[in-house]
Image (cartoon, rainbow, N blue to C red):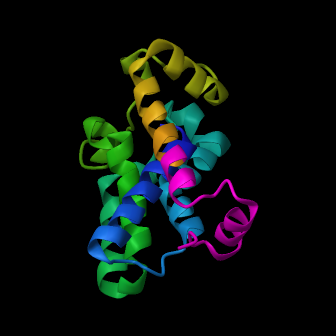
Amino acid sequence: MLPQSHVAYTWLALSVAQDKLGVAEDADYRLVALAAMGSDLIDKPLAWAYFYERYKSAVLFAHTLIAYLIVLTLTIWQFPRYAVYGFAFLGHAFLDRIFYFYDTFYWPFRGWRFHVWRKQGSEQEKIGNAYWRAFTRRPDLWGWELGGLLAFAYLVWRYRLYKPGNLLHFALTGRPPR
């Protein structure tokens, strides 16, 4: 899934949780966006710098069950005020459906390797071609991205972020105008 869809789905979930459950009213949507992309923000630079050549994967340590459990445990028991950001980080696993990629999700319990995308028909020689190859060979991914676009469009409409003042407020405070 592309980064903007991770953010859009997570923002939509947060918006609904705030409205229906009255939770995380003071959440900063900017930090939620970073947390929603957290696994990729950690793993992609690691893959680019070293691990892609070795493991042929750009989905590494931050996409593992261990990483998600550590973040969830820390944010629930040690820093409960930041639990919303932990849940945003955890949401990345669900949106990527990473639990279907056993070698990565259960690393190191199934060995020291990570899932190699070649097995899914989208392996590439260079990490920079990853999205292009995946999206041209797997049209089902377009549905997820279209859903992300619709979620983002809904939030823009709901909070009237097309108005410069509302957008500026959102950008400066990290909170949608109410």
Magenta stretch contains residue 141:
no
**Region of the chain picked out in magenta, as a range:** 153-178
Query: Magenta part mainly helix, strand or loop?
Result: helix
Can I make out residue 50 in this image? yes
Determine the residue positioned at 47% across, 58% down.
Answer: 11
Can I make out residue 112 in this image? no
Q: Nearer the viewer, residue 33 or 92?
A: 33
Determine the residue positioned at 63% across, 48% down.
Answer: 45
Residue 43 at x, y percent in the picture: 53, 49
Relative to residue 36, is residue 109 drawn left or right? left
Determine the residue positioned at 41% across, 64% down.
Answer: 15
Count of labels shown?
0
Determine the residue positioned at 75% across, 61% down.
Answer: 164
Q: Nearer the viewer, residue 106 or 28?
A: 28
Residue 138 at x, y percent in the picture: 43, 17
Relative to residue 74, is residue 153 drawn left or right? right
Q: Nearer the viewer, residue 60 or 129?
A: 129
Residue 131 at x, y percent in the picture: 57, 27
Residue 144 at x, y percent in the picture: 41, 33
